[in-house]
Amino acid sequence: METWFTIIISLSLIFLLRVLLSLLQKSSTTKINKPFPPGPTHIPIISPLIWLTKSVSQIEPIVKNLHAKYGPIVTLRIGSNPTVFINDRFIVHQIHQMIVLGQTWSHQPHFFCKRHIINRPKNLHIEDFISSNQHNITSSSYGTTWRVLRRNLSAEMLHPSRVKYFAQIRKWVLDVLLKRLKSDMKSSDSVKAMDHFQHAMFSLLVFMCFGQRVDDEKLNDIEQGERNLLLSLEKFNVLNYWPKITKVLFRKRWEDLLKLRSNQEMVLVPLIRARKEAKKSGLCYDNNNPRAYVDTLLDLKLPNEGQRNLDEGEMVTLCSEFLSAGIYTKCGLG
């Protein structure tokens, strides 16, 4: 009992010291920072913890009421950085144009990005963990790595000249879809069409990603791993707030996140290794076996990191991004 009491007191003191240092640092830079849009009163320590324990479904109605009170732009301090919510389409369009401009000028980092600092906001701790330290397209900072990954996806997989090579696979997926629909129609009064369409799309995406057809059991394992990770992210938000402390206080949540990532790797890594071995054995590409996304990742090199290849963890992250972006509207490609 005394040991646990000592640990709790020590952690509390570390927590309070970190807060004081953070407040001192912020107060020293307040004069040079521009003010944020209006929002509710921010109480250090208490406000961030309250927001981080809420899910998206709980925050949405609160934000709606805040828009009615403060206007179309509202600031909430969720975690260590302010978060701005916008509900005006015209303002969102203007911001979108600014993002497009930022992507354009990010190809010339020595001129525009260094002077005007057009970039994505800094990732939270959990985002860094899920993205293999920003080695994916949706969260990587604008720069060399982001350009290489984005160009690879656009040119090697999404370009019309590449998409046509998967025509035979699309035909196979369509045949599978029709058979599943007909079978369901015979066996039940109602048909859940969405489930069958999602299964068909995921089958296509898995083939495009790994270059092989997988059985339903393996397909379900892949989909379950992606779904579990996406649906569980909200409960890990609290780990973004002073990770060194919250990982101890919320140890069970941190272990759950590690397990979800481990399960994802257990399913995807064998598929990556199988494709790697196939390439070594002189795999040739044709209409029945077009170049898969994993093939492009195996050949990819990171120029700003010593021309090294991607490791397996980074390839798992990029494959997960590819699959999730294709089947879940929650994810984009940046």
Image (cartoon, rainbow, N blue to C red):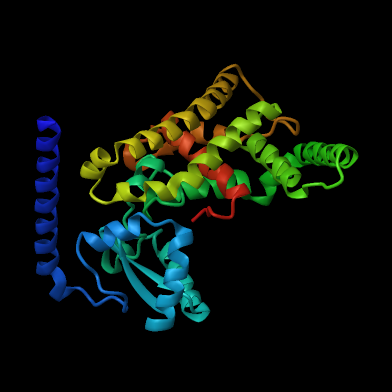
Q: Image quarter for residue 303?
A: top left
Vertical relation: 161 (above or below) 57: above
Residue at 49% across / 25% down in the picture?
266
| Residue farthest right in this picture | 186
- Left or right? Give the position of 321 relative to 106: right
Identify which residue, 14 or 156, lies in the foreground. Answer: 14
Residue 98 seen in the figure: no
Residue 63 seen in the figure: yes
Q: Exactly how many numbered labels are in the figure?
A: 0
Vertical relation: 102 (above or below) 136: below
Residue at 84% across / 38% down in the picture?
175
Residue 192, image x, y percentages: 77, 47
| Residue farthest front in this picture | 1
- Left or right? Give the position of 89 relative to 189: left
Vertical relation: 253 (above or below) 92: above
Identify which residue, 83 or 276, lies in the foreground. Answer: 83
Residue at 60% across / 30% down in the picture?
221
Q: Image quarter for residue 121?
A: bottom left
| Residue farthest top in this picture | 281
Vertical relation: 195 (above or below) 43: above
Residue 228, image x, y percentages: 52, 40
Residue at 21% across / 42% down in the picture?
244
Image quadrant where one finds the N terminus: top left
Residue 312, image x, y percentages: 44, 29
